[in-house]
Image: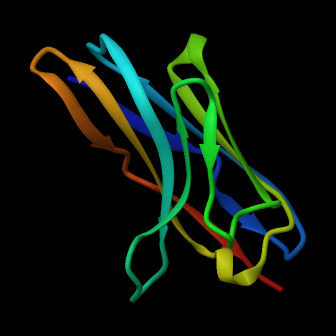
Amino acid sequence: QAQLQESGGGLVQPGGSLKLDCQASGRIFGIGTMGWYRQAPGQQREWVATIKAGNIANYPESAKGRFIIAREYNRHAVNLQMNNLKPEDTAAYYCDADLLVGGGWSSCWGQGTQVTVYS
């Protein structure tokens, strides 16, 4: 069974940096678009970054210039480098990927990793 595992969350002061990692594992025959989303307490899940075939990256305005998404094809992984973090970036961060498994393409989510930016 295919799954995604995030890591790299933690506590950081404003202006600091963190690098999140998400690795796919299991019986996977291909990986399509991969992305990161986040959800703060009491709020809806919001899009943070996606990367498509050809390493085409997209970000919302809140992440542009501060976050960088990148694939590691040899590890079936995707990273999110987060710089100049702000208290409003505090949230649980989730990895999402389109995975080609035995039954066809399937959207898969990880369990999440917590990022807390505090003064």
Q: Position of residue 108 (x, y in %)?
A: 29, 40
15 to the left or right of 24: right
Q: Residue furthest right?
A: 15
The image shows residue 27, relative to residue 110, as above or below, that is above
Q: Image point 44% across, 84% down: which residue?
A: 41
Image quarter in which the C terminus is found: bottom right
Q: Image point 82% across, 60% down: which residue?
A: 65
86 to the left or right of 25: right
Q: Nearer the viewer, residue 14 or 102?
A: 102
Q: Position of residue 61 (x, y in %)?
A: 68, 70
Image quarter in which the N terminus is found: top left
Q: Nearer the viewer, residue 45 or 52?
A: 52
Q: Image point 31% across, 27% down: which residue?
A: 99
Task: Give the total of numbered labels.
Answer: 0
* Scheme by which the image is coloured: rainbow
Q: Residue furthest left?
A: 103
Q: Position of residue 90 (x, y in %)?
A: 63, 76
Q: Nearer the viewer, residue 11 or 95?
A: 95
The image shows residue 112, relative to residue 38, as above or below, that is above
Which quarter of the picture shows residue 63? bottom right
The image shows residue 104, relative to residue 7, as above or below, that is above
